[in-house]
Amino acid sequence: MSEPVVNASTQNQPASHPTAPRAGLPVVALTDIRKSYGIGTAVETEVLHGIDLSIEPGEFAALIGPSGSGKSTLLNIIGLLEPATSGEYRLGGRAVTRLSDAEITAARAEALGFVFQFHHLLPAFTALENVILPALIRKGAWTAADRAHGLALLDQVGLKEAAHKRPGQLSGGMQQRVAIARALSRGSPLVLADEPTGNLDTKSADDVFALMRSFNREQGTAFLIVTHDPRLAARCDRVIELIDGRAAVR
Ligand SMILES: Nc1ncnc2c1ncn2[C@@H]1O[C@H](COP(=O)(O)OP(=O)(O)O)[C@@H](O)[C@H]1O
Ligand SMILES: [Mg+2]
């Protein structure tokens, strides 16, 4: 396969955004991705057996499958949280399989937002501070513009009034809405969500799902959402099913 040009300086792309989506290229392109645990031990097990999968810009896709089928493993590989054992991964057109740790951290921060089943908000920080935490980590301080941006995001998720409350003072659904605002705070082209409604009652799950859908429609953010809930999967544009470490699109 010929190697697409990924040198930012020849692509009329800001050098700081080498994994930003490019016209005509998928946000994520996986080719024959395999993952084994316990390599070289007696319990070596391959859990992903050659996944081919593309996520297009602005797509809203569900990832479903039985417990233990490899959904979280796949999401973590796409999220650059763990490496594949073999195969090719292109994020925004750029091969990311063999980047250095520093390049991986930069690519993750710029191209990906995350929402987990448990909100992973920092309890000592307010909702607003949690939303703009990525800016603090990046720059070591918050600017007035960061705070204004964070407040606007909290307003979009219906939580402006709760901006100065700590996660412990918020309901599970509200905490997850803060986590969504945080995932969107850098304007990443793709948000990965691992069972984001798995810990919520039906009404809160519907609200959280609707919120992701509205960000998808209004801002064109692509979402890949692991869910056990067939009602929610049916409301996605595409359903990718993992069965025993193999992917099928329904
Ligand atoms: N760090 C790990 N070490 C060893 N095995 C793992 C590890 N993470 C996941 N697995 C195994 O990989 C398989 C897929 O797990 P996972 O991706 O968490 O599935 P799912 O999210 O679909 O429930 C399971 O058999 C699980 O036990
Ligand atoms: Mg899982």
Image: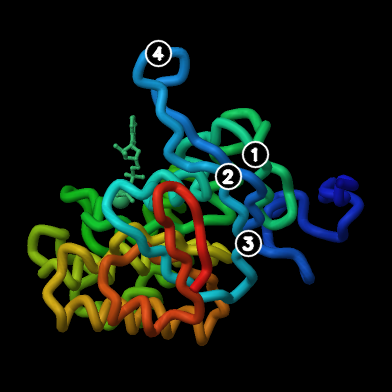
Task: Name the disc covering residue 41, or none.
Answer: 4
Disc 3, SS = strand
Indicate the amino acid at tag 1: Gly
How far is the residue under mark 2 from the one under mark 1? 8 Å
Pointer 1 or 3: first along the chain = 3
How far is the residue under mark 3 from the one under mark 2? 13 Å
Q: How far across and how far down the image is residue 153, in percent? A: 39, 74
Q: Visible in this render: residue 155?
A: no
Q: How far across and how far down the image is residue 19, in percent? A: 68, 53
Indicate the amino acid at tag 2: Gly
230 or 219: nearer the eye?
Answer: 230
CB-based contact (under 8 Å), mark 1 and mark 4? no
Residue with the mark numbered 3 = 54
Disc 4, SS = loop
170 or 40: nearer the eye?
Answer: 40
Pointer 1 or 4: first along the chain = 4
| Residue sitting at x 52%, y 56% | 112
Residue with the mark numbered 1 = 87
Q: Nearer the viewer, mark 2 or mark 1?
A: 2
| Residue sitting at x 16%, y 59% | 167
CB-based contact (under 8 Å), mark 2 and mark 1? yes
Q: Visible in this render: residue 159?
A: yes
How far is the residue under mark 2 from the one under mark 4? 21 Å
| Residue sitting at x 33%, y 84% | 210
Task: Name the disc covering residue 188, or none.
Answer: none
236 or 210: nearer the eye?
Answer: 236
